[in-house]
Image (spheres, grey):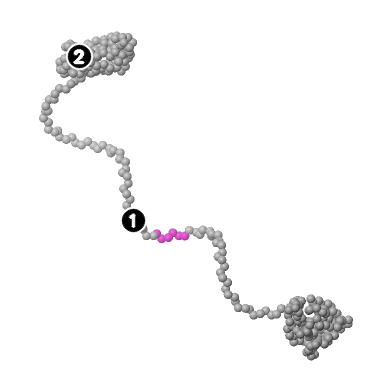
Amino acid sequence: MIKRRNILGIGISVALLCLPILARGQPGPTATATPTATPTPPYPAVTHLEAGQTLIGTGPATDPAAAYLTAGQGIDITSGPGSIEISAPSGGGGTGAAGPTGPTGATGPQGPSGASGVPGIAGPTGAQGNTGAQGSNGLPGAAGPSGATGPEGPSGLQGPSGPSGTNGSNGAVGATGAAGATGPSGAQGSTGLTGATGPTGSAGPVLANSMGTSLETAAATAYFAIGTTMAPQASATYIEMPWPYGETFTKIYCYFTAAQGASKSDAMSLIDVTNTCATALTCTATNATRCSSTSGSCVVSAGDLLVMKDVTTGSSITARNGACSFGP
C-alpha cells in the first residue's frame, strides 16, 4: 500500500520509480535513484538523500525487509514486503529539482502483488492498424410491409390468335315451330273419268230407333215416331213414319234413364199400322232400366207405316226418358 503525506520544506526530491520488491513469487514495485556510485551488497544504511538523488531498491539478492532509512530523514522503509512509508522530515527547505532517471534495476524474484502505481501519462496514439477482414453477412432482415399498389400499366399489344377450337357436338333438336299459315287454294283439277258401277251389295240389317222424353208418370198409353226424339203422344195419328225397307223385325232392346219404381212398369212395342205384326214385338221393364225380347215377329213391307208404343202401369212413376231399337 502506498501512502502520500505532505512533504513541505524538504530538500530531498524522491522519485519512486518501479521499486521492485519481490517476495513469495509475486512482483513488487521498483524504486530507482541515481547515486554517485553503484553500491554492491551488503548495502550501507541510507540515512538521508541529497537534493536530486533517487532511492534505488536493494535488488533481487537483498531481503527487502532489510532496506531502511533513518526515521525523520525523509523516507522510511519499514519491515514487511513492499511496505514504503513517506513521512515529513523534522525540518524543511525548498523543493529540490528532480534528479535524472537512474538505470533500470535487475528484475528481482517474483514477490507478492505490489500496490498500484500512479497512472502514467497517456502515450501518443499508435499508427492505425490494418483493416480487419470483412465480417460475414448478417442474417436476412424481416420482410418489410408490402408497398402500395402501383398505377395500372398500359395494355399490352394484342397477342396472336389462338388455334381454332374443335367443333362442338350438335345441339338438341329444337321444338317444332308453329304451323305456317295455310297457302291459297290451288286451281281445281279437271274432272276424272266416271268409274264403272260396282255390283249391288247384299242387303244388310236395318235398325229402327225411337226415343221418348219425359215418359208418362201414371198409367197411360203413349206413342213415339220412329227415327226421332219426341215427347209422348196420346195418338199415333200424324206421327206414323213410312219404313223404306222390306224386312222382318224379331228383336227389341230398350233403355231407361231411371227405374220406374216398385210394381211400376213400361211395356214398349213396335207397331206396324199398315200390316199388323203376326206376333207382337214387345219388352217390359218393371222397376228396371233395361228390357229386351227376341220372341216376337213383325214382317214389314217397304212403305209400311211404323210407330213405337209405350203402355205404363202404376202411379207416381219416376220421371225418366226411354229409347228402343228394333232389328231383324
Report the magenta residues as a range.
153-158
Q: Is residue 155 magenta?
A: yes
Res 133 quadrant in image: bottom right
Residue at label 1?
Answer: 164
Task: Name the residue at 15% across, 17% down.
Answer: 246
Above/below status of 39 relative to 283: below
Instruction: Tell me if 322 is positioned left or right of 85 in this view.
Output: left
Along the line of sight, the residue nearer the viewer: 116 or 148: 116
- Helix, strand, or loop for circle 1? loop
> For the residue carrying disc 1, how many other residues have a C-alpha within 10 Å: few (<14), some (14-19), or many (20+)?
few
Say what amino acid the circle numbered 1 marks: Ser
Q: Quadrant of the N terminus?
A: bottom right
31 vs 256: above or below? below
x, y (%) of residue 122?
Answer: 71, 78
On whether residue 47 falls in the magenta region, the answer is no
Residue 275, numbered circle: none
Question: Can you identify the residue that label 2 sits on?
Answer: 296
Q: CA distance from mark 1 to mark 2?
A: 91 Å
| Residue positioned 74% across, 77% down in the render | 113
